[in-house]
Image (cartoon, grey):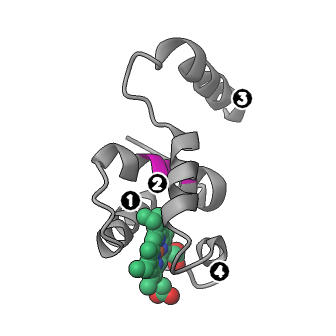
Amino acid sequence: MTRFKGFLLAACMTVICPGLQALDIDNGMVLHDEHCTRCHQPDIYTREKRMVNSFSELQEQVRQCELMAELAWFDDEVEDVTAYLNESYYRFNIEK
Ligand code: HEC
């Protein structure tokens, strides 16, 4: 299953998605490192009693923090950062 997902992701990045509005995890990382480390460091995402316990809560929290920081991001940017945090720290199963 994991290998299958890896294949899908690879296929997505190389063949299928460039023409679509693909999630851009690298872009999420750049945005995150530039704008999201002012108030907290990434260790907040892996602390023992973290607030976020599902992918939808993660989306919500990224949006809340983005609003709080007055970044005026587009939905795409919120989604890229959410994807980056999920991929790097939270690792929720994304079911859409
Ligand atoms: C204005 C300050 C501020 C900025 C800037 C900020 N945050 Fe936050 N963030 C907070 C606070 C405050 C909390 C809650 C901390 C707590 O309760 O211990 C938090 C918590 C979080 C959590 C939940 C961590 C957990 O416990 O699971 C996530 C995820 C998060 N922020 C993401 C982001 C992202 C992404 C950005 C950039 C868009 C960002 N934050 C920018 C203040 C900020």
Q: Is mark 2 within 8 Å of ligand 1?
A: yes
Q: Earlier in the sequence, mark 1 or mark 4?
A: 4
Mark 2 highlights which residue?
82
Q: Is mark 4 within 8 Å of ligand 1?
A: yes
The amino acid type found where label 1 is placed reads: Gln
* Range of residues picked out in magenta: 80-84
Instruction: Please tell me whether mark 3 sits on a helix, a strand or a loop.
Output: helix
Instruction: Please tell me whether mark 1 sits on a helix, a strand or a loop.
Output: helix
Residue 47 pos. (x, y %): 65, 80
Residue 41: quadrant of the picture: bottom right
Q: Report the residue that reaches farthest toward the right.
A: 3
Q: Residue at x 54, y 60 (%)?
A: 34
Q: Residues within 10 Å of mark 1 (few under 14, many from 20)?
A: some
Q: Earlier in the sequence, mark 2 or mark 3?
A: 3
Q: Earlier in the sequence, mark 4 or mark 3?
A: 3
Which quadrant of the figure contains the N terminus?
Answer: top right
Mark 3 highlights which residue?
3
Magenta run includes residue 95 = no
Residue 66 pos. (x, y %): 35, 66
Q: Is mark 1 within 8 Å of ligand 1?
A: no
Give the foreground label among 2 and 3. Answer: 2
Contact? badges 1 and 4 (CB < 8 Å): no
Mark 4 highlights which residue?
47
